[in-house]
Image: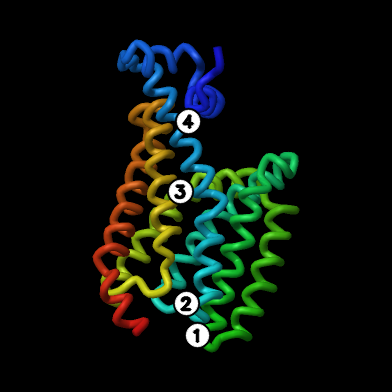
Amino acid sequence: MATSPVKEFLVTYFMPTKCYEELFVNLHLHVPCLKFVLKKIAGIWILLDIFLVQLLQLLKILWRGNAEGLSLSSVLLQLYAFSCPVVYAVTNSFPLFAWSERLLTLAQTVVITFLILHYRGDTLTGALFLLAYSGLMFLLGSYAATAVVSVMQSSSLPALIASKVLQIRANYSNGHTGQLSSLSVFLSCAGSLGLAFVSVQEEGGSLATLSHILSACLSCVLLAQVLCYKSSNKKKSD
């Protein structure tokens, strides 16, 4: 008997055969299977967040030819947050394939930072920043003490949370979201919710879990702003 394409797809990517039978054949809402499927879906959203969010934002800035509405302070905090796991991986001699996606995200954020300065007319400042940042990353990766690296790693999530707060404040002050990519915000929101769900399942009510939940809530606020200010953005583009 031929296997259903839907079954083959679901069993291949989302659930074992036993869960498929429980959920779709027996029509039984099997809680462990539901959690398993939700974790799989959350994992996909997290990966999309890592690989696409900064790239889509970068492409929108390049396409529009300006970075209006993007908070430089927010992006700098993002840059710090994305730098921390890279420094941690380098100092611990992790193989490149284990953190290459973080390096890619970091590189995209560096370019976004430069473009914000460039489109504000501070190209020289942006170039000097790139040189200074590259030198700092080299020094941290080569000579940073273990304690410093540990503090950086533990502070990356708070920095990311703070970056969202600053962007939310900038959106509110401006009355629009400018060149903030709607798709990036959506994927970031989905990824943050996925991280919060996985953290709740694996760590319970820990401080890290509460931080992920706060981050997810702030991402939802950003998404709400993108939707609410949509008409304002259209008027500005016109």
Task: Residue at 42% x, 32% y: name it.
Answer: 198
> Between disc 3 and disc 4, whose residue precedes?
4
Q: Are marks 3 and 4 in contact (CB under 8 Å)?
A: no
The circle drawn on residue 40 is 4
> Between disc 1 and disc 4, whose residue precedes?
4
- The label nearer to you, 4 versus 2, is 4
Dot 3: within a 10 Å radius of its alpha carbon, few (fewer than 14), some, or many (20 or more) residues? Answer: many
SS under mark 4: helix
Q: Are marks 2 and 1 in contact (CB under 8 Å)?
A: yes
- The label nearer to you, 3 versus 4, is 4
The circle drawn on residue 120 is 1
Residue that carries the numbered disc 3 in the rendered image:
157
The circle drawn on residue 67 is 2
- The label nearer to you, 1 versus 3, is 1
Q: Position of residue 209 (x, y in %)?
A: 38, 36
Q: Amino acid at mark 3?
A: Leu
Q: Are marks 2 and 3 in contact (CB under 8 Å)?
A: no
Q: Amino acid at mark 4?
A: Lys
SS under mark 3: helix
Q: Quadrant of the C terminus?
A: bottom left
Question: What is the total number of numbered labels drawn onto the structure image?
Answer: 4
Q: What is the C-alpha distance between the residues marked 2 and 1?
A: 8 Å
- Does the image show residue 74? yes
Dot 4: within a 10 Å radius of its alpha carbon, few (fewer than 14), some, or many (20 or more) residues? Answer: some
- The label nearer to you, 2 versus 3, is 2
